[in-house]
Amino acid sequence: MRLKQKDEMNNANDMNELIQNVLQWGIDKNITGPDGKGTQYGQADKMLEEANETHMAVNTNDLRDVKDGIGDTVVTLILLAEMYGWTLEECLQHAYNVIAKRTGQMVDGVFVKDAK
């Protein structure tokens, strides 16, 4: 059990480091930061582009491109959250708080939430 906790801590540290690297990349590419020329709309558009590429890769079962697409989409979301002054973790926690108590059912392989 102790080893698992240590591995999870290393994974958390690795994830935090990756997020910091992405944030620095966004600054280096002038997407975010004080000199950043990126816009929230532009970043949201880029997120949709990457998500669509992921969708196409899933459709063709191109596992390499699925993995790349998921990663690229997460990068765009990290930068979009940053543009609003939030962290990815804050956004994920907010979403989880909403879905945690959600009820629904599986329909054709998709979870469909119950109407309120």
Image (cartoon, rainbow, N blue to C red):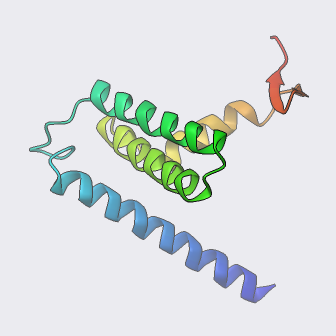
Residue that extends furthest to the front in the rendered view of this protein:
60
Percent position of residue 44, x then y: 37, 29
Say which residue appears at 65% left-offset and 39% top-offset: 59
* Residue 67 in the figure: left or right of residue 50: right
In which quarter of the view is residue 114 placed?
Answer: top right
| 34 relative to 7 in the view: left or right | left
Tell me: 1 left or right of 64.
right
- In the image, is residue 115 above or below residue 97? above
The x and y percentages for residue 111 are 81, 30
Is 12 placed above or below 73 here?
Answer: below
Which quarter of the figure has residue 100?
A: top right
The residue sitting at the bottom extreme is 3
Nearer to the camera, 41 or 109: 109
- Give the tally of numbered discs: 0
Q: Toward the viewer: 45 or 80?
A: 45
At a point 20% along the width and 36% down the height, the residue shown is 38
